[in-house]
């Protein structure tokens, strides 16, 4: 990945949560530019954990107002490996089929994420979830709170 020094350098931290799979779910994200942070969250009443993981990253990227240099921190190997191990490129080459010849799940969300990857320079960093990483823990709190709103628990 080529770093574009003319672009703002942004960090995005993201997480998803789901009760049942499918079930009510939520996502949380933190955007950081220099020492300024913005928190985002949302959810759905009937969804999956992978969809919420994707939505956290997508919503954060879609909130950016100009092309940026973005380092994305996720505890989702599903998302990180899709980029770092070229799963996405292979899915597209194979007509949105997995190596096992099955339709790729969440294709519409992957396409939204790919649209953002064209706008921004993205760098992916997998982090272990629930391992004391402060931003990941905060994103989990945001995701769980959103999930609970969609489960009518609050």
Image (cartoon, helix red, strand yellow):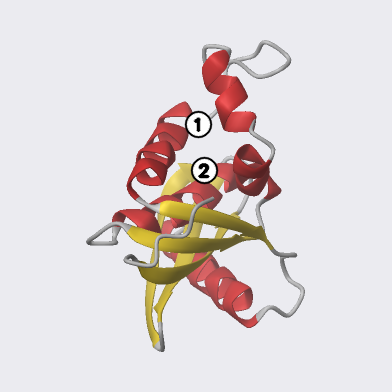
Q: Which corner quadrant holds the C terminus?
A: bottom left
CA separation, marks 1 and 2? Answer: 7 Å
Is 138 above or below relative to 113?
A: below
Q: Residue drawn at (42%, 64%), measured in percent from left and top?
A: 149
First reached walking from the N terminus: tag 1 or tag 2: 2
Residue identified by numbered label 1: 106
Q: Is residue 91 left or right of residue 55?
A: right
Q: Position of residue 120 (x, y in %)?
A: 37, 52
Is 130 above or below relative to 89?
A: below
Question: Which mark is drawn over residue 90?
Answer: none
Q: Quadrant of residue 93?
A: top right
Q: Residue drawn at (55%, 51%), measured in percent from left and top?
A: 53
Q: Position of residue 94 (x, y in %)?
A: 58, 12
Q: Residue drawn at (51%, 65%), measured in percent from left and top?
A: 143
Q: Residue drawn at (40%, 84%), measured in percent from left and top?
A: 34
* Residue 148 seen in the figure: no
Residue identified by numbered label 2: 51
* Residue 136 seen in the figure: yes
Q: Position of residue 41 (x, y in %)?
A: 40, 65
As helix, strand or loop, the secondary structure at mark 1 comes to loop
**Camera-side residue of 21 and 32:** 32
Q: Quadrant of residue 109?
A: top left
As helix, strand or loop, the secondary structure at mark 2 comes to helix
**Camera-side residue of 118 and 81:** 118
Graded by Cα atoms within 10 Å as few (under 14), some (14 to 19) or many (20 or more), the crowding at tag 1 reads few
Q: Are the residues tagged 1 and 2 within 8 Å (C-beta)? A: yes
Q: Is residue 104 left or right of residue 147?
A: right
Is 19 above or below relative to 51?
A: below
């Amino acid at each position: 990945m080529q770093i574009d020094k003319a672009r703002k350098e942004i960090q995005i931290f993201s997480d998803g949560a789901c009760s049942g799979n499918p079930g009510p779910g939520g996502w949380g994200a933190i955007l950081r530019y220099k020492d300024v942070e913005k928190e985002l969250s949302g959810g759905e009443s009937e969804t999956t954990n992978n969809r919420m993981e994707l939505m956290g990253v997508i919503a954060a990227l879609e909130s950016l107002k100009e092309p940026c240099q973005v380092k994305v921190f996720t505890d989702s190997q599903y998302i990180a490996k899709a980029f770092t191990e070229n799963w996405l490129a292979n899915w597209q080459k194979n007509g949105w089929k997995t190596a096992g010849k099955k339709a790729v799940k969440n294709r519409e969300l992957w396409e939204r994420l790919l649209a953002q990857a064209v706008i921004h320079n993205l760098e992916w960093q997998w982090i272990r979830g629930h391992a004391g990483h402060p931003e990941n823990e905060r994103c989990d709190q945001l995701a769980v709170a959103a999930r609970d709103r969609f489960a009518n628990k609050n």
